Image (cartoon, helix red, strand yellow):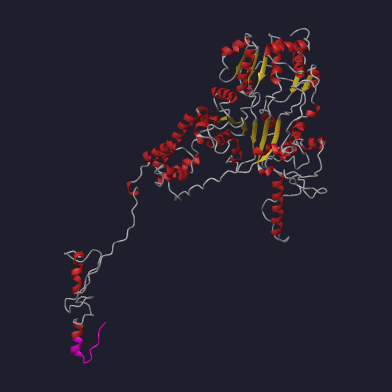
Amino acid sequence: MPAEAPSFSAIREKLQNHFSKRACLWQLKVTDVFLQNDHDIICIAGTGMGKTLAFWSPLALNDTGILIVVTPLNQLGEQSISFLKKAGIQSISISAETASMANFRGIEDSHYCAIITSPEQLMKPSGEFEKLLLLHIRSENLVTIHVSTDHPNIKIGVCKIKYSLASYADLAFLIPTGMKIDDPPPLKFLVFFDSIQDGISAAKYLRVRLPPDLRDKVKWFNSDMTTEFKEAEVTNLVAGDTWGLCTTEAFGMGMDVPDVTLVIQWQASCKLSALWQQFGRAARDHALEGTALLFAEKEYFDDVREDKCKRQERKNKATSAPDNQPAAKHRVINCSTAVGIAHPEEGDGAQATSSGSVENTPIVTDAQLRELMRPASTLERASRQKKEKELDQAMDLLINANYRGVGCRRKIFNIQFDNGSADSSHLICDTSDAEGCSHCGPIIPKVCCDIHHPLAFSSFDPIIVPQPPRLPIRSRLAKYTMGPQEFKLCEALEDWRDQKTVEIYGHPHLINLGPTVVMGDSVLDRIVDCAHFQKIKITDNLHKETHWSVNDNLAREVIAIIHRIIPISLYTTAPLKQCPLEALPLTVNAPNSGLAQHSAHIPSNGPPAGVKKVQKCSTCGQAGHNKRGRICPMHPSWISSAAEKENPRRLV
């Protein structure tokens, strides 16, 4: 390190020559403290403000030192290497793929000035970083440089999820209905999800809304993807070949895509700091205007909570029982303490506005807001361990800012990150302009949030999505005991879905997440059960019995496996039909005049088929009985009775 640190003007000139960027005053302060080499540094700045330039700056003034940067994203390491290479600085990214002895030997020989690695590699046993001393940051030896984290060029909105979470229909506005190939592309967007599976499912839903030739314009992006794929997709997103990504935090801090104009967080399951980090992906080019939206579950909104409380109160009144009867064993919501709802009757003339807020609600001061956003104590957190996961307090205030007297969603972020005490040295940063530095100076947002400017967010309202047709009713299957064929089919289907997962998504996906993305366990079990009862013969049967959303090619492969192991019985391929017998005319005992008329219908060897032969007595010649029947007048019983008695009696 030099004996005396250079002046700010000399540092700025040096950084301009190396990185072709003009450094702001706060970046010069960070560099100056670095060069003094006697303080620890904490730098707080918004996304896209230039923190990366601040911690690369010492390399431009001292080419003998080594800088180690720890980042959780391998993709950021690759971007840093490319950035430093343009400045003539040798660097290396150490990951699982590059952690070789040859690379560590190059680091020991001072071939690299910058080393980018991940926390996992840093903490890994035998990861070659054991010799580093632990960091001990002391308050008396600490310099904090704090600039505002606000993004005036990003307008902030909160949307209530209208449709079911699994349908992702609230995101349908991203792809216009009936879009054609020649139509202009939609806004370049990023949608952040907490789970990889949600990101994949949402991307598939959006792709269905596109013409087949354009469905590769929307993709999912997560940590399971290969490094080559992620590098290619970032390039495609910058170039405009990809319109949007459904991603996780894998596309996070440091990703430099300047023209993303719409960022969405799906579900209010993250902390406010993580949400602001993701919102910061929008409009990194300060000349653009971006939009950041939080789609939150409807049960987190105060108006829905209040309606639920009112329904609970009406239910309690209707089902109230005498004191001597046992209380109902169901959860009762305490409406007076559930949430801090600003009721319309509170205050003089309070009225609900069209945007959902409440007029004349008492305004919450900054001090009150800080107290409301204060994290829960350790004891309070421990008491909630066995309860359901609760919404973060700051996120709760952000969602209900129009009901709690806050009146502005941006104010929540400013209080959370203490932007009021941030350093404002823009006038000194650029003395050539009367208004100071245009990069680090405060800017009044043209559009603040959906509370102040609700009309600016009308284009992001959920569109009316037609209800999908009802799924066909599945067959009811009796209980049975699996045999060798069923077990063999189960093993064959498991092998098949493993193979297809590797072919479609790659081997890392199979190792980390399993094959259920291709075929779930419940679908596999249902296929085996239906195959036992011979219910699956064609692809339509497979879709009906399993409700499995799969293309016909994969469906035919599954059916071929079923029929190979459990063949279809020949006796069930063509079910018997019940047909009525054709009635033939009865000609026995018919008059002689009609015999010729029906003679053509009577076979010469007997009565027609299906007609019972009428008995004829051989003694008396009458029909309906034979000679052994006592009803025959020539029966012996009649003759003997007449001889013995004067008045004979008929025997029955």
Query: How far from the left and from the top, in percent, is residue 410?
Result: 74, 34
Quarter holding the N terminus is top right
Nearest the camera: 598 or 645? 598
Q: Which quadrant does the C terminus fall into?
A: bottom left
Q: Nearer the viewer, residue 467 or 362?
A: 467
Relative to residue 236, is residue 364 depicted above or below? below
Point 81% across, 44% down: residue: 360
Q: Please tell me which residue is depicted at 46% across the width and 45% down the height of the picture.
A: 544
**Can you give x and y, in whole percent of width and height, for residue 404 in the image?**
77, 42
Q: Quadrant of residue 381?
A: top right
Q: Position of residue 166 (x, y in %)?
A: 58, 41
The magenta-colored residue range is 640-652
Magenta stretch: helix, strand or loop mostly: loop
Using the rendered image of the protein, determine whether residue 529 is visible from the camera's viewpoint: yes
The answer to whether residue 425 of the structure is visible from this angle is no
> Measured along the vertical axis of the image, is residue 635 above or below residue 432?
below
Image position of 181 (left or right of 153): left
Outermost residue, bottom direction?
646
User: Can you tell which quarter of the image residue 103 is in?
Assistant: top right
Is-magenta flag for residue 445? no
Closest to the observer: 299 or 109? 299
Residue at the farthest front position:
182
| Residue reaching furthest to the top | 3
Q: Position of residue 537 (x, y in %)?
A: 39, 44
Numbered-mark total: 0
